[in-house]
Image (cartoon, helix red, strand yellow):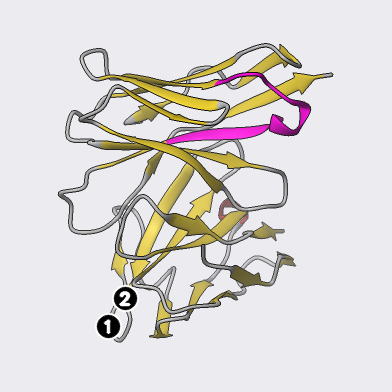
């Protein structure tokens, strides 16, 4: 039972355009969501997060949108750069739990073409 | 952010043997975790490494197969015991301070079992 789903295994965009990465979740207890970026041979690095009390969080070129009723979030990267090419993981957490367990999606490979 | 190192970075092992992976952090941290990423899959939490007490394992993972130690607030080990080819994965250590939105990952250990 996959509680966090990233249905697009890959995405290819042109440099300068917008990249939109999508994520769906099934567990309504999740109340905090994070995006991680992973380059080959490196561990995931934290990118941006959003609390369930918000519907948008912006940090420079990165914006995350949350639609709680649809249990859907998306990461927008504008403008996309070749250095953004990486695997992006969506993760969710229930902050009322006894630990800090992150539940991850399978990731989306983003390729930004020059 | 914490700087995390893992040893070894990769290894190729024979079936039936065991491998111990080390995780070292450059500062004291509250929480340490061990994740596994099987090929084409998401990151899956194996266990929470508790300082001075037994680790807390997630469903599907047992201490006999994945014994974990955490002797202090900056170091932990994960042992993959009696390995089989199905254990071929990337094993990642992560750490968190008091806030769950700041979970940092090590570079990972790529394990191949023949």
Q: Dots 1 and 2: beta carbons under 8 Å?
A: yes
| Residue B8 image point, x, y percent | 69, 72
Q: Given the image, what chain letter belongs to the residue carrying mark 2?
A: B
Displayed quadrant of residue B20:
bottom right
Q: Is residue B20 above or below residue A42?
A: below
Position in image of residue B55 (x %, y %) = 31, 73
Q: Residue A95 in magenta?
A: no
Quadrant holding the C terminus of chain B: bottom right
Q: Residues within 10 Å of mark 2 (few under 14, many from 20)?
A: many
Question: Taking B21 as reference, is B98 above or below it?
Answer: above
Residue A7 or residue A88, whichever sits in front: A88
Q: Position of residue B86 (x, y in %)?
A: 57, 51
The residue that appears at 65% across and 65% down in the rendered structure is B15
Respond whether the residues carrying marks 1 and 2 are from the same subunit: yes
Q: Nearer the viewer, residue A42 or B45?
A: A42
Left/right of residue A71 with respect to residue B89 in the rendered view = left
Q: Which mark is residue B53?
A: 1
Indicate yes or no whether the magenta region holds residue A88.
yes
Left or right: where A81 falls relative to B89: right
Secondary element at tag 2: loop
Image vertical order of residue A112 relative to residue B58, above or below: above
Q: Seen from this angle, which residue lies furthest front?
A: A60
Q: Observer-nearest residue: B2 or B46?
A: B2
**Tag shown at residue A50:** none
Residue B50 is tagged as 2
Position of residue A52 measured from the top left corner of the image (x, y, whole percent) = 23, 31
Q: Residue furthest right?
A: A114
Magenta stretch, residue numbers? A77-90
B21 lies left or right of A82: left
């Amino acid at each position: 039972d996959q509680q966090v789903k990233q249905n697009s295994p890959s995405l290819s965009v042109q440099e300068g355009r917008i990249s939109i990465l999508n994520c769906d979740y099934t567990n309504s207890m999740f109340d905090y969501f994070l995006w991680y970026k992973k380059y080959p041979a490196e561990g995931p690095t934290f990118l941006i997060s959003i609390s369930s009390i918000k519907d948008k969080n912006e940090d420079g070129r990165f914006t995350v949108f949350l639609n709680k009723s649809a249990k859907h979030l998306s990461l927008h990267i504008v403008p996309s750069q070749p250095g953004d090419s990486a695997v992006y993981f969506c993760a969710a957490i229930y902050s009322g739990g006894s630990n800090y367990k992150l539940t991850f999606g399978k990731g989306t490979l983003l390729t930004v073409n020059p | 952010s914490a700087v995390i190192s893992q040893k070894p970075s990769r290894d190729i092992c024979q079936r039936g043997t065991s491998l111990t992976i080390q995780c070292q952090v450059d500062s004291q941290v509250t929480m340490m975790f061990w994740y596994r990423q099987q090929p084409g899959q998401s990151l899956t939490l194996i266990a929470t490494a508790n300082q001075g007490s037994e680790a807390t394992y997630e469903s599907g993972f047992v201490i006999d197969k994945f014994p974990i130690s955490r002797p202090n607030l900056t170091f932990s080990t994960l042992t993959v015991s009696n390995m089989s080819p199905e254990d071929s994965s990337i094993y990642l250590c992560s750490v968190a301070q008091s806030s769950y939105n700041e979970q940092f990952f090590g570079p990972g250990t790529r394990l191949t079992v023949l």
